[in-house]
Amino acid sequence: MAGITAEGLSTVYPNGVRAVDALDLEVADGELFALLGPSGCGKTTLLRTIAGLEAASGGVVRIGSRDVTRLQPGDRRVAMVFQDYALFPHMTVAENIAYPLRVRGAAKSVQRETAVRTAGGLSLGELLDRRPGQLSGGQQQRAALARAVAASAEVLLLDEPLSNLDARLRLEARTFLKKLQRELALTTVFVTHDQAEALALADRIAVMDSGRIRQLGTPREVFQRPADTFVANFIGSTPMNLVPRGAEVIGVRPEYLSPAADGLFTGTVSVVENLGVTSLVTLDCGEDQIGYVVPEDDEPRVGATVTVDAPPARVLRYDKETGLLVR
Amino acid sequence: MSPLWVVRRIGFSVLVAVVLAFFAVPMLWLASAPFDSKPGLGLRWPDWTFANVVATFGHPYALTSLLNSLVLCVVATVVTTVLAALAAYALSRVRIPGRDLLLYLLLLLSSVVTGTAAMVPIFVMMLQLGLINSQFGTALVIAGGMLPAAIFILKDFMDAVPRSYEESARVFGASPRQVLGHVVLPVARPGVATIFVWAFVNAWGNFLLPFLLLRDVGRQPAAVLLRTLYDEGGSANLTVIPVFSLLYSIPVVVLYLFVNKRYGFRFHGGIKS
Amino acid sequence: MGSSRPGGAGLDSAGLGVRRAIGFVAPALLLIAVFLVFPALWTLYIGITNYQLTGPAAANPRVVGLDNVVEAVRDPLFTNSVWLTALFVLGSAVIGQNALGFGLAWLLRTVRPGLRRTIEGLVLLSWILPGTVVAYLWFAVLSRDTGTLGLLLGSPQTAWLVQYPMTSLIIFNVWRGTAFSMLLYSSALAAVPPSQLETARLAGASGRQTVRDVVFPHIRGHVLTNTLLISLWTANDFTPFLLTAGGPNHRSEVLPVLIYRQALESGQLGYASAMSLLLLVGNLAIALVYLRLLRRRA
Ligand SMILES: Nc1ncnc2c1ncn2[C@@H]1O[C@H](COP(=O)(O)OP(=O)(O)O)[C@@H](O)[C@H]1O
Ligand SMILES: [Mg+2]
């Protein structure tokens, strides 16, 4: 078992794209760590650079105390699950799972035994002799996980492990993944562009943009106190209200706003959207539009005038120039 | 149903029948003449006999030439498939300096330099190298001619193999050789099989190159012997020609049926040149 | 690029590295260089000598410059052959295979699957059977007295290959080569969006109007590609030698046959090379147009 350290890590593609840009990162031993960011921000590239599939153009990658920057992928003791799972179509599930052992020249009986044991732990026991093409999406995902687990690596890397599953299955797989990671206590880095997934799963999250880390913290920290307006915008299922006030921008999550006699914003109700047990209300306040969330059956009429307020600790102030959190 | 519709329907059926006849009638000879007691260059209901088959197997060069064809074909096909697979894999995966130019030139070469256009220098070259009548040399010439197209078609197949397969294997510690043997070749097998069959059929039917380069009748493949039978001793040897034609065609037809069943006759650019 | 990036880590998905990759490509390139590139270049040299198969010029060929080319252009046999080749390409490939290939692809869409497979199978068989065998099949169709065509038309005394050699060759080559066009057009037609065909049907367009207004715009590129490729192959086809050997009296002597006869039967290697050169230049012209097309589509 081991943590991961990146110091000043850069990855530049031959076409000049600087996908990872002088990035520092520390992932603790046994941690479930999320790389979160919009598409194209360099998450996959960072993961591949840690795995050794892309060569670092500068900086250092360490796994535990070993400097692996110049090692071949196979010598780094990492296991990886690709976004498309990369299950070998000509091998059975058992052969796929045992592949890491086959490469190391393990005996056939040991290979089979490991495949059976690992598959059992991931409820794949019935499917050992099927081909990947005969599995459902969720089964394929678990088979790919099983193969990575069977590698008994020090570090597990997952590229968008849930994005190829449909919505309902994704929730199930999410819970499963978290449980598995807890049981194995294996240092795990997973990439996602879905903030809800990152918040739900991770011990800590790194929010990335243009090859750099914008904020690194626990899900709670990242949700409650986004370090800058970019993160504030990106995190949360309903976008944060960001309202310019002089040299600052005021940020309040719609969930923290509620009607009050006197408060931050006053406006006319223009839209009411049903979110299930809550509704999202949009207020027109002159130039700005303010969203806030009300419980079911408490929706105001469209056209009504409403004033909303939030607890002072939930009202954030950002510098208008830099976008950074002031307080 | 309107009369126009009926007329159209009949016209359509007649058209299909004519097309069918155009392609089928010439082939009937291959079914009738070999078993006719008086085989000729024409179509008639055979007066059944197996005498021609016996005569053909008794011909001093018939079986030898089929064997020669097999040797020539296997060498040319194996050389083409193995070399093309290696080259296509490397060209598909690695940006070798000048790769795009190389691919362009290969495509150009494969269409411009045909056996027909280059027959004189090839003949002179083999003459001066003392390789006239060398089966191995002739096989290499045939392979050289097939390689550019083979590389091209195989590269298409290799490009379609997801890179994550290899990367996955590498993360688990597979060496380049293991990546190739465990993952790439098995996944690209339909492509390799296609090229193998394509090369075999092409080499099997190739007439011009062995005709130019193998002058000794004992070393000639079936393609050339079949021609020799036409004017050997002044007139066509009609006892042997039909049966021999049939024997010589069987491997091609079997391979075709195999490919058709296994992979369907998919379409790959200029698969036959 | 390898040296500018630190670490031995992956430069490519295969983990081969440039050096090993070159090792993988080299054997194939060597074979191509020796048996394809070198002969092509050597044609240039032999073409400007008076090299002969036998006699004094065999041992010590002399450079005669462009004499061979000039002589070829003035040689009535050569001009006759160029004309016949053009006729052969135009008749059997550009018109024959193209039209029949498209017609088959279009017809077979609506035919029962069983019949469709039979017709496709026969067309493909005529393409893959060895050339020498195919020559006999057509002797059996075209020969005098016993030939199938004579029997069908009730004129068994006609020796088709002697009396109408070029027409015979053209029809033969349509039979032999249509499979490629059929396959190409079938896959092109399969790519025409069905919704557009249905729109045309709803608008009441006839079959001809549908082809002209809906289908053709989609397959225009394929028509050009197909025409170029089959023209190239037909111009370089040696099978006419097996059927008529250029006869009677040079009346079907297409370029490949003329080159063979000049080189191997008359022993005029230098002169034949000069003619090959002209064939190579023709091939090059077609291939360049073809590659430009491919590039534009990519
Ligand atoms: N093989 C490549 N060659 C060149 N540029 C690439 C390559 N792969 C990714 N990029 C670029 O690098 C940036 C980061 O890509 P990626 O790491 O895939 O982002 P993410 O996984 O966050 O969506 C993007 O701008 C992308 O266009
Ligand atoms: Mg990605």
Image (cartoon, coloured by chain):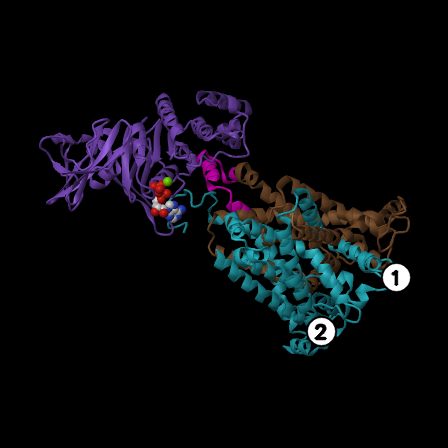
Q: Image quadrant of residue A174? A: top left
Q: Chain A's shade in the image?
A: purple
Residue A280, position as x, y percentages in the image? 23, 33
Q: Residue at x 75, y 58 (%)?
A: B211
| Secondary structure found at label 1 | helix
Q: Chain B's shade in the image?
A: brown
- Please give the chain letter of the residue carrying mark 1: B
Q: Is residue A261 visible?
A: yes
Find the magenta span and give its range: B157-179
Q: Amino acid at mark 1?
A: Gly
Q: Is residue B242 above or below residue C75?
A: above
Residue B119 vs residue B24, the one in the foreground: B24
Q: Residue at x 56, y 58 (%)?
A: C209
Q: Image quadrant of residue A173? A: top left
Residue A139 vs residue C258, the one in the foreground: A139
Look at mark 1 in the image and give the residue it sits on.
Answer: B234
Label 2: how many Cα within 10 Å (few below 14, some 14–19, many 20+): some
Residue A27, position as x, y percentages in the image? 30, 31
Cβ at disc 2 under 8 Å from ligand 1: no
Look at mark 2 in the image and give the residue it sits on.
Answer: C80
Q: Is residue B237 left or right of residue B100?
A: right
Residue C107, position as x, y percentages in the image? 64, 51
Label 1: how many Cα within 10 Å (few below 14, some 14–19, many 20+): few
